[in-house]
Amino acid sequence: MSKVQALDRPALNALLCAMPKAELHIHIEGSLEPELIFALAHRNGVTLAYDSVEALRAAYAFSDLQSFLDIYYAGASVLLQEADFHDMAWAYFLRAQADNVVHAELFFDPQTHTERGVDMATVIHGLKRACDRARAELGISASLILCFLRHLSEDAAFETLEAALPYRELFIGVGLDSSERGHPPEKFARVFARCRELGLHVVAHAGEEGPPEYIWNALDVLKVERIDHGVRCVEDPALVQRLAADRVPLTVCPLSNVKLCVYGQMSQHAMPALLAAGLCATVNSDDPAYFGGYMNANFIALFDALPQLGAAEAYTLARNSFEASFAPAADQARWVAALDRCFSG
Ligand code: ADE
Ligand code: ZN
C-alpha cells in the first residue's frame, strides 16, 4: 500500500477526503442546517425563537452536552410532515456523497417528534424514502437506527418500540442517546433485552460525558455491539483491554468532542491512544450542522491537530468504519477493496 508512507499535509488531506468511508454515528436531526430549519419553519408555519439564520448559528456555542441538546431539540420542532424528514435526510446524503461516504447508518430520535404529535409512520417513511433514494441516485447504502432518549423513562422507550414495530423491517437497530449523566445504561436493561430478542442490532452512547462504568454497563447489561463515543474508556486500562479483546467498535466524533468541551482542544483528543491500543475506532460527525462539519471536516480537523496521525491511521480508520458497520459482509469486502485501490494509487 504505497500511500501508507509519509505524505505532506495537502496530500494527506486529499487522501482523507478521497478515501471511501462509512458513517456510523450521525443523528439525522443533527444534520439540520440553520437554512433548512428556517425553510421548514416557513413551510410549516412554525415560529422560531431566532430572527435569522445568522442569529441561530450564533447561538451554537455550547458548554456541555445538555447546552447543545436544548437547542438541538428546539431545531427539530420544524419537522412535521413526511416530506420534512425526507428533505432533511436527502440534504445529508448529498453532503455525505461529497465526502465519499459510501455507507451511512442514521440515528433518529422518534420521541422528539411523537411527543409533538407527529406519527411514527411520518418519521420513518420520510427517512426511509430518502435512504432508498440515496441508494438509487447516489449509490450510497443507508440504514436507520432508532434511538431511545435516555432522559425519558424506560416505559416511554417500550411505548416507542411498540409504536415502531409495525415498521420493523425499515430500521436495523436501536441506540440510546440524549443526556448521559444520571441516565446510566442499566436504566434501559429490559427494553434492550426485548430489542435483542427481536433481532435488532443494539448500540448505545456511553463514555462521552459519562464515566467508564457506563461503558462497562452498556457492554455487560445492554450487550451492545458498538459503543457510541466511548472516549472516556482511556481512563480505565482494563476497559481498554476488554474493548480491544472483543474488538468492540467505538464511533468517535472528534468535532463534537471539542464543541461539547469533552476536550479543551483537538490536540488533546484520545484518538491516537485509542488507535495505539488497537481499538476499532472510527471517525463520525455526530451532529454536523451544529459542530462545524461533516465527515471530511472531522478527519481533517483530527489529523491537522495530531501530527502523529498519518496515512496508515487514515487507512485503519476507514477500514474500521466498514468492519464496524452492520452492512452485509459482501458489501464490506467491496468497500475495503475500493479503499485498498485508493491507497495503492
Ligand atoms: N443526540 C444528538 N447528539 C448527541 C450526542 N452527542 N450525545 C448524546 N445524544 C445526542
Ligand atoms: Zn451522538
Image: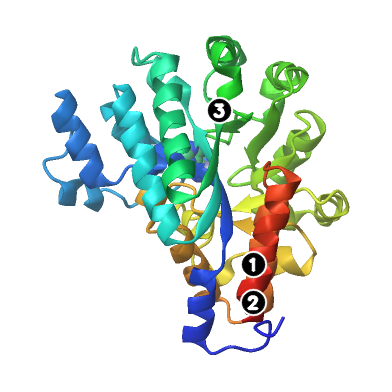
User: Of marks 2 and 3, which one's residue comes earlier in the chain?
Assistant: 3
Relative vertical location of residue 94 with respect to residue 6 in this rendering, above or below: above
The residue singled out by tag 2 in the image is 343
Give the number of the mark in front: 1 or 3.
1
Residue 257 horizontal/vertical position (percent): 51, 55
The residue singled out by tag 1 in the image is 339
Q: Which residue corresponds to the image point at 66% horizontal and 80% vertical from the top-left? A: 344
Taking the image as drawn, is residue 156 in sight?
no
Relative vertical location of residue 168 with respect to residue 210 in this rendering, above or below: above
Disc 3 secondary structure class: strand
Q: Which residue corresponds to the image point at 33% horizontal and 23% vertical from the top-left? A: 82
Taking the image as drawn, is residue 110 in sight?
yes
Q: Which residue corresponds to the image point at 75% horizontal and 29% vertical from the top-left? A: 222
Give the number of the mark in front: 2 or 3.
2
Separation (CA) of disc 1 from disc 2: 6 Å
Q: Report the amino acid beneath label 2.
A: Phe
The residue singled out by tag 3 in the image is 146
